[in-house]
Image: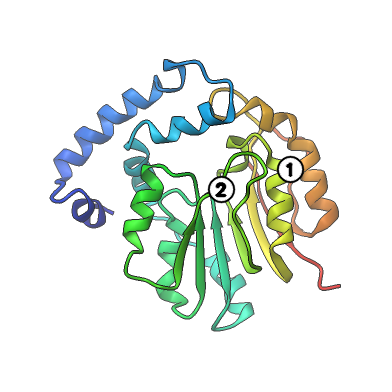
Amino acid sequence: MLGELTAYHKGLSREEFWVRYTLGRMEAAKLWERKPRSTEGDYRSFYAETDYFVLRQMYYHRNDCYHDVAASMRRVGREGDFCEYGCGVAPVTAWLRSRFPRWRFTLVDLPTPTLAFARWRFRRFPNVELEEPGLGADLPLTRAYDVITCLDVLEHVINPLEVVRHLVDHLKPGGELRLNFIDAPGGENLVESAAQRADTIAYLNRALEAVVPLPIHTAHEVDARYVKPRR
């Protein structure tokens, strides 16, 4: 973790990391309320107003392993297409890329400091591409994928039902979708998203085959795994 951050910030030390992390955390806690936020543009700007989330995500995911996603990819074979939708600093791709060097990886996120870091992080790898969604229904995927992850994303978008329809449309037959969706509206966990949560999950349960289903009514974050029927 610190090695990449040191290279990115041109000499960031461990002590400087903790100072920036601690101060950034206090500042980010007040960031949402700093100005009125009532439109999609207002919501999206929140993630571009600080670079703290680069430090937080790198620290939070520093020990993450994705053996379950890797198992899905191995079932496909030595080559395939993977999408990390709502990637942030792209911890999933960072763990998988060297293990699946012949796969193609697509990272999707808003134009924010975390995406800028992900772009830098994979700058030397031609099999990693980055895409940005537009506002509303302007969604970015144009080809089909064997495996898609959408983690810690849906509660932050105004149109989760439209987003998952887009993901399902760009999932290959037999492909797997892994996602989560918490039910805790307030602040950056958008009330618009919470209002569509039940319909979004119901659509997933109809359109795909649930290996690990996502219950429609839950107060907790639940991970789900779906497979697209081959028929």
Residue 180: x, y in percent?
63, 46
Which residue type does callout 1 highlight?
Leu
Q: Residue at x 38, y 46 (%)?
A: 114
Closer to us: 209 or 158: 158
Residue 28: quadrant of the picture: top left
Residue 162: x, y in percent?
72, 45
Q: Residue at x 76, y 42 (%)?
A: 200
Q: Are marks 1 and 2 in contact (CB under 8 Å)?
A: no
Q: How far separated are the C-alphas under marks 1 and 2?
A: 15 Å
Q: Secondary structure at mark 2?
A: loop
Snapshot colouring: rainbow
Apparent side of residue 181 relative to residue 216 in the rendered image (left or right)? left
> Visible in this render: residue 225?
no
Which residue type does callout 2 highlight?
Pro
Q: Say the numbered circle drawn on residue 122.
A: none
Residue placed farthest to the bottom in the image?
78
Residue 178: quadrant of the picture: bottom right
Closer to us: 66 or 206: 206
Q: Quadrant of the C terminus?
A: bottom right
Residue 4: quadrant of the picture: bottom left
Q: Residue at x 78, y 51 (%)?
A: 204
Apparent side of residue 109 relative to residue 193 in the rendered image (left or right)? left
Q: Say the numbered circle drawn on residue 161.
A: 1
> Visible in this render: residue 110?
yes
Closer to us: 141 or 8: 141
| Residue 84 position (above or below residue 53) | below
Residue matched to label 2: 133
Q: Residue at x 51, y 76 (%)?
A: 103
| Neighbourhood count class around disc 1 (C-alpha, 10 Å): few under 14, some 14–19, many 20 upward | many
